[in-house]
Every structure is written in C-alpha cells, then in structure tokens.
Image (spheres, rainbow, N blue to C red):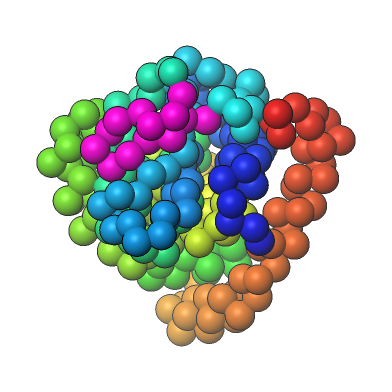
Amino acid sequence: MTNDEPSLRRDLAAAYRLAALFGWDDTLYTHFSVRLPRAANASPEDDRFLINPFGMMFDEVRASDLLVVDLQGRVVSGSADYNVAGFTIHSAVHMAREDAHCVLHTHTLPGMAVAACEQGLLQLNQISTEFYQRVGVHAYEGVAFDLDERTRIQQSLGNNIALLLRHHGLLSVGATVADAFAIMFYLNRACEIQMAAAQMASVAGPVTEIPAHLSQHACEQLQSVEHERQILWQAWLRRLDRIDPSYRD
C-alpha cells in the first residue's frame, strides 16, 4: 500500500464514494479522515490529516476536493470549511493513536440502533466475533463542538479498533484506508444482524449469543487473515472504477 499524499487522497475519496454506494452517508454529515505522512524531523504535534469539505455529498467527493487540516484546526490546503464536530472527533483519534492513520465515522441506522442499546454489540454471528472485546463505548455528550471532549474520546477508544458513540453512531480506525473501511463494513454488518435478530425475537424467541471462549477463538482466527482487507479494498476499487472513476480526479 502506498503512503504518498496523492494515493491517500484517492483512497479516501474512494471511501466516501463507496460509503455513499453502500448507503452509509447522512446528507452532508459524518466524516472520514486520513493522516498524511509526517515530514522529516517533524513532531507528532505537526501532523496533518485529510478530511472532507463541508457541503459536499459523499458521492461528489474527489481526491482534489479533500482539505488538509492540522491538529490546531487550521486549513493548510483547500478553501472550504470542515465540519467542526468532525474535527473534534478525528483530531482526537489522530492525536492519541499513532497507528490510527485512517478514521471513519458513520451515522447508519443499524449503527445508531446498536449504539442506543445498553449492552452494545452482542456476539450473535461470526461477523460479530471480529469485534469481541475490541470495541470501546463513548458516552453521549451532545454535538462534539467542545474540544475538551477529545480527551474522553481518546480514553473511550483506548487500543480498540472501533468505538460505539452512544446515541450517535460508529467509528473505526485502521493503519490504512483499506483497514478502517473493512472494519466499518463488518461492524455495520454486525449491527444489521443484531437489529434483524431483535426484530425476529418477538416471533422466533430470544436470541442466543456465542459463548465467550468461542468468540475469543474466532476473533483470533479472523485477526490472522486481516491482510485480506487489502485484497478486498482492491476489489472494491475495481467496482467503483466500473461505476464512476471520477473520485480519482
């Protein structure tokens, strides 16, 4: 996987387009980001990341449209504004996690439904096991306009690969756009399964969870094939290129 700015721009723009294709978008809201390579002799405080300009639908985003923002909230490259809550959430993660090069945040129906459940994500299916003890929970504090919330977001996420934002939605992190996108895809799918199981429970009886030892075993098995996310990402890019390659512009 390449790590230069043009390639990261194309991958992040592709993530926006794919999210729209999969129905994850929320009009102008929610946001994805990717950290840019750190300049020689630069410190972590000098990090910059790409994020979408506020006002564009996900299916409109092109590589050249993405803004470069620093950790102080200054737009380093680009002439548009960004979503303020998006800056709070994404800067919090990029500041705290050296391995979190890409951060995705969504407001999908199944994600918000599970985020409203007291027990959070349940172990109902093999897909859910990827997230066994790997999802943090962040309490709702209102719209994320307050930069002080960054510290609490960081604590809630910890070393996990994903976060349930109570009464809000989902967040995933990854070393690459491919990683973060695959994590979000399957986290959202696990939430879809949980929502469907809850709907069926009234006629089919209580749902049953996978025993903890089997969830742990399956989680370890799935971690051993995480390299396949890169193969999946290339397949998604080919699909997107067949539909509309303009995200690359």
Where does the image place residue 22, in percent across and percent down from the top left? 66, 36
- Magenta extent: 66-78
Farthest residue, direction right: 242
Task: Indicate whether 52 appears above or below 127.
Answer: above
Q: State left or right for residue 223 relative to residue 87.
A: right
Where does the image place residue 138, in percent across and percent down from the top left? 25, 49
Q: Depth check: 121 or 137 in front?
A: 137
Task: Indicate whether 48 appears above or below 208.
Answer: above
The answer to if 74 sits in the magenta stretch is yes
* Residue at position x 73%, y 58% in the image: 232
Image quadrant occupied by the C terminus: top right
Q: State left or right for residue 55 relative to residue 23.
A: left
Task: Indicate whether 229 appears above or below 242.
Answer: below
Q: Is residue 148 visible?
A: yes
Where does the image place residue 91, in percent across and percent down from the top left? 31, 44
Farthest residue, direction left: 148
Q: Depth check: 177 or 131 in front?
A: 177
* Residue at position x 38%, y 19% in the image: 81
The answer to if 234 sits in the magenta stretch is no
Where does the image place residue 132, in percent across and percent down from the top left? 44, 70
Q: State left or right for residue 191 relative to residue 225.
A: left
Image quadrant occupied by the N terminus: bottom right
Q: Depth check: 187 or 41 in front?
A: 41
Farthest residue, direction front: 41
Q: Is residue 173 visible?
A: no
